[in-house]
Image (cartoon, helix red, strand yellow):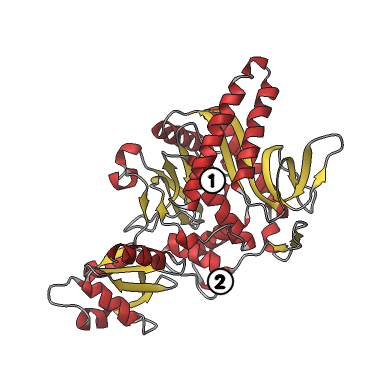
Amino acid sequence: MSTILSIANLLEEFKKKGLKDIDKFLLVNHGPMIGGMYEGLTKEIIEKSIFKNIDLHVVSGKITNQNGMMSNQIDCMLVVGEGKKLPYSKEYLYDIEQVVMVVEVKKDLFSSELSSGYDNLISVMNVMGDSFKNTDGDLKDDTNGTVLKKKLQLSVIDVAFRDLANKPLATDINTMSAEEQLLYHTMVTEAWAPLRVIFGYYGFKDENSLRKKFIEYLQKKISRKDKGTKGYGGSSFPNLVIAENASLVKTNAFPYAIRIEGTDKFCWVASYRRNPLILLVELLWTKLELLYNISPYNFAEDLQMEALAPLIVAKVTENGWMYDAIPMESIDPIYLKSDDEWMPIKISRAEWILLNVLGSKEFVEVDYFKNNLVGTNDNPNEILKHLINEGIIYVDNGQIRYLTLECKTVIMPDGNFYAADDSDGRLTTWIKKIMTQYR
């Protein structure tokens, strides 16, 4: 069992116990007091999700910036370093630069609570503004003297961009199309912004009802012709919505991404029908590694793969974002299977040859590939289609190039060929595990 899955299962048991403890005191029949208990439980869950060797705190209060703007009141926020404690209060003010995650807590999550939580989280994005353009701030960790630097690397954005756009970032961003530049700037915002979570304990009973109500909410808001349509670009969506028995997660490639084969669209929101705290831990630990290069364990050792069902498919146009919703009944059953273990892509011998030739060159001409690297029984167009859909290669101006950062191929003892991007180390972990079974 992976580290993340183990932690998430422990958190789920803690959550169940906490809810039983709260149930005993619901007789107080006072909204703010009851809400305070659920907020307190959520803070404890977040505290148990993080590691203790850096200066992370879970507080409530408001978020501000250098211009004095303030967010709405935030039930729960994970922050780095010291903030300003309000006199005679347990609330804090924290600069947006210090905020890792914000959580809106809802005892019952239904349509109205979904709307209010969404609006509250939008206030966080409004405060963020252009703060991500200043990436040189240092935050001191008083526990061990470590200086935490909140700074993004272009390579991180490039990896995410490849997952969504099926092509790498251009060396000069200004040479990209208007649509590609908009997606790039969205990825920068996504990487820099605090995680935004709506955490509901009760409410929507199943995955399908949560999906339907979220779609209805978006249709109602986006169809308006007035200023109400603002706040629904790609960056405005919450990263995670947790309901009683289901959740929604933003598949922005930090870390989750779902390819939509044969189109220029990408999945932006997906649903999940199992323990949502798995998603919470995965998102949080990815964010901490992304912003501060700190991680409690080696992500390469985690072969657990969450089975996510696409909900919102997006496309970036010169006029902004366009969305399509996928009804539950239209989803390919492959997305509804049980969580599975990661494995590399199984490829044919002809595909293996192409990838190995490409490994020694900057690119391979499509015509050269078709005339020299395929057998009489191979379909070169199907080979290219398969490798493109799997995110291994892309074709640009008649040239085949790697889309991966570190493509590796392997022939296993059973005679099958496999390929994967091993820049995250998962292929190496998978090979070690499989080879252990052969010994």
In the rendered image, is residue 279 in sight?
no
Which disc is residue 280 wearing?
1
Q: Residues within 10 Å of mark 1 (few under 14, many from 20)?
A: many
Figure quadrant of the C terminus? bottom left
- CB of mark 2 within 8 Å of CB of mark 1? no
In this picture, residue 160 sits left or right of residue 104 = left
Q: Closer to the camera, 223 or 411?
A: 411
Secondary structure category for the residue under label 2: helix
Q: Closer to the camera, 303 or 375?
A: 303
Q: Which is closer to the viewer, label 2 or label 1?
A: 1
* Residue 229 position in % (x across, y down): 56, 41
In this picture, residue 76 sits left or right of residue 110 = right
Secondary structure category for the residue under label 1: helix
In the rendered image, is residue 92 in sight?
yes
Can you say whether 432 is above or below 234 in the image? below
Image point (57%, 54%), residue name: 285
Q: Residues within 10 Å of mark 2 (few under 14, many from 20)?
A: few
What is the residue that sits farthest to the left in this orientation?
376
Can you say whether 29 is above or below 245 in the image? above
* Residue 349 position in % (x across, y down): 22, 73
Can you say whether 181 is above or below 310 in the image? below
Image point (70%, 23%), residue name: 33
Q: Which amino acid, mark 1? A: Leu
As measured in the structure, the alpha-carbon distance from the residue carrying label 2 to the one carrying label 1 is: 35 Å
What is the residue that sits farthest to the right in this orientation?
87
Q: Which residue is mark 2?
A: 174
* Residue 275 position in % (x across, y down): 46, 39
In this picture, residue 131 sits left or right of residue 368 = right
Q: Closer to the camera, 81 or 228?
A: 81
* Residue 29 position in % (x across, y down): 66, 15
Q: Earlier in the sequence, mark 2 or mark 1?
A: 2
